[in-house]
Amino acid sequence: MLSKDLEKIEDLQVRKNVSLLPLTSFRIGGPAHLFLVPRTLKALEQTISYLGNRSISYKVLGQGSNLFINDKGVKMVMTLAALNRIHSPPGHPFRTVSVEAGCRLKSLISWSTRNGLCGLENLSGIPASVGGAISMNAGADKCSMAEAIDAVQFTGPDGSCWFRRDQLQFDYRFFRLPDNALISAARIQLGKSSPDQIRRNVRKVMYKRRTTQPVGKPSAGCVFRNPPGDSAGKLIDQCGLKGLRIGDAEVSKKHANFIVNRGKASAVQVMDLLKIIRERVKKEADVELVPEVSIWGMET
Ligand SMILES: Cc1cc2nc3c(=O)[nH]c(=O)nc-3n(C[C@H](O)[C@H](O)[C@H](O)COP(=O)(O)OP(=O)(O)OC[C@H]3O[C@@H](n4cnc5c(N)ncnc54)[C@H](O)[C@@H]3O)c2cc1C
């Protein structure tokens, strides 16, 4: 009944039993029983209105790089991957760029570089959709998405609406999302530079990332938030937990705040590893680590 109704929405692709494992960087997780792909903003609005009016909950999938999904899967997932256009909106100076939430951060940075627009270089190498990067306020080296944001468009059961930067609340790896809404687009404010200079900066950031993170191995990025004034990775390392392994889930030997999937790690194995890490850090450093990853369908 539900899927039949949804199939009537024009430009909405409705798929059943879609494996989420290949859609996450961790390569862990069961299927989505219903998987929704709106191809236009109108289809997205109609879908959210339909679901909202019936109080049907769903999960939003970006690029799946900060997600940890249970082995049984989840009921309904929506991806905005087909909403990925970038353009300079009329009436705005050229340095303001409009981008749909499903666009990959990497594509946005490449587009900006080609057009001589700087400001996002420090975020190079963060695997993310623009919507996911805003919702997590992704960042590195004291820079974060928040600094580049001019406005965000939310879509909820009552339609879409733009909010200016001064109406938005960002914090360290935090963004306040209105209830029942998702991020459907954003306006980004950039500076002017030469494409060659931007490329050089991007290369530097990428080099640092390759030398300090287990890039290339399946993971969900940093698992825990840094406690105020401290580093979660350093605390885990000081407990001697690098290399600790349960099944195929392992505390990275390169960066202790990463758990890598060495093959066929299950969600249960990762949860067990998280538990041990939290207990050890609490016991030895008296610090409560709080997960940074979004966890779907499991208690921490
Ligand atoms: C190798 C590696 C390195 C990483 N390095 C960094 C780093 O340096 N800095 C950093 O901050 N992060 C880092 N991460 C984590 C990750 O890249 C970021 O958190 C990123 O912002 C996640 O974006 P995503 O599109 O993949 O979101 P997803 O993982 O798909 O989703 C994350 C959360 O955002 C929500 N979400 C996604 N899209 C939307 C939307 N349109 N509207 C509302 N909610 C939405 C999801 O529901 C979920 O709760 C790294 C990850 C990996 C694997």
Image (cartoon, rainbow, N blue to C red):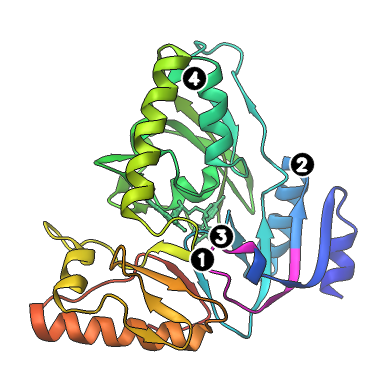
- Which residue bears the numbered disc 2? 40
Dots 1, 4 in contact, CB < 8 A: no
* Marking on residue 218: 1
Dots 3, 2 in contact, CB < 8 A: no
Q: Of the residues shown, which amino acid type is indicated by label 2? A: Thr
Is label 1 or label 2 in front? 1
Residue that appears at 22% across and 87% down: 279
* Marking on residue 64: 3
Q: Which quarter of the rendered picture does the C terminus lie within?
A: bottom left
Q: Earlier in the sequence, mark 1 or mark 4?
A: 4
Looking at the picture, how far across and down is residue 113, in whole percent?
Answer: 50, 22
Find numbered disc 3 in the image and state the secondary structure of the residue it sits on.
Answer: loop
Find numbered disc 4 in the image and state the secondary structure of the residue it sits on.
Answer: strand
| Horizontal side, residue 205 vs residue 187: left or right | left
Q: Is mark 3 within 8 Å of ligand 1?
A: yes
Q: Quadrant of residue 290?
A: bottom left
Q: Earlier in the sequence, mark 3 or mark 4?
A: 3
How much space separates mark 2 and mark 4, taking CA atoms? 22 Å
Range shown magenta: 23-35
Residue that appears at 41% across and 66% down: 293
Residue 26: say if magenta: yes
